[in-house]
Amino acid sequence: MPKGGEQEERVQDAVSKALSYLQKRDRTRRQVELRLAERGIEPGVAEQALEELERLDYVNDERFARNYAEDRRNLDGWGSERIAAKLHEAGVPPGLVAEAAGGRDRDDELAGAVELLGRRLSAAPTDDRERERAFGLLIRRGYEKELAYDAIRAFEREAA
């Protein structure tokens, strides 16, 4: 078992490595934990480093989830299902995933889907084949099936 000073040095080394990883963008606790493990940091030392990073607010899963969901909605036109799946993959706790991914009401989600269709399609679908392509686009972006159908109908009404 390392002495107190040696343990503190290890923790500070782990914190330093984690801060280097966090320099470019926000990460989840789980992502930082995995990165430290890849760098050969012992689990006990990594845990202490993560506690320190959370105390200093360098690692904050709630902030990560909220910002990630907002960015993916606004920049990439993603729906709630895709956002939730990606947050889950990143190691965000289930309660925070549900809160961040479900942060929009149905009308806002529908408006986002219609806006995405407007950006990606030159005109409203005029036949079943074009509707299927639009539907596929929305499903791949993580919109629920029913909402995708409603968005296509709304997009067609707006274009008419």
Image (cartoon, helix red, strand yellow):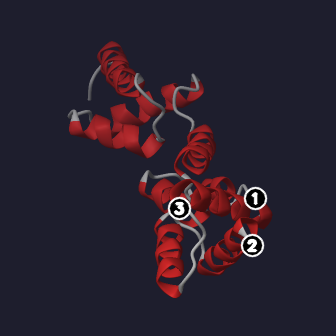
Residue 35, x across and y down, in percent = 30, 37
Q: Which residue is mark 2?
A: 157
| Total numbered badges shown on the rendered structure | 3
The residue drawn where x is 26% and y is 33% is 41
Between the C-alphas of marks 3 and 2, the distance is 14 Å
Mark 1 or 3, closer to the camera = 3
67 displayed left or right of 103: left
Q: Is residue 26 above or below residue 20?
A: below
Identified at 53% across, 66% down, the residue is 142
From mark 1 to mark 3, how far is it between C-alphas? 20 Å
Residue with the mark numbered 1: 108
- Is the C terminus in the top left, top right, bottom left or bottom right quadrant? bottom right
Secondary structure category for the residue under label 3 = loop
Q: Is residue 34 left or right of residue 81?
A: left
How dense is the environment of label 2, judged by Cα within 10 Å: few (below 14), some, or many (20 and up)? Answer: few
The residue that label 3 is drawn on is: 121
Labels 2, 1: front one: 2
Label 2 SS: helix
Q: Horizontal and vertical percent for residue 116? A: 59, 57
Q: Amino acid at mark 2?
A: Arg
Residue 149 image offset from top left, x and y in percent:
64, 79
The disc labelled 3 sits on which kind of residue? Answer: Leu
Q: What type is the residue that disc 1 sits on? A: Asp
Q: Earlier in the sequence, mark 2 or mark 1?
A: 1
Q: Please state the horizontal and vertical placement of residue 44, each as a whole percent of the image.
A: 35, 37
Per the image, label 1 sits on a secondary structure element best described as helix
Q: Nearer the viewer, residue 31 or 111?
A: 111
Q: Quadrant of residue 99?
A: bottom right
- Nearest the viewer among 53 and 145 is 145
Q: Earlier in the sequence, mark 1 or mark 3?
A: 1
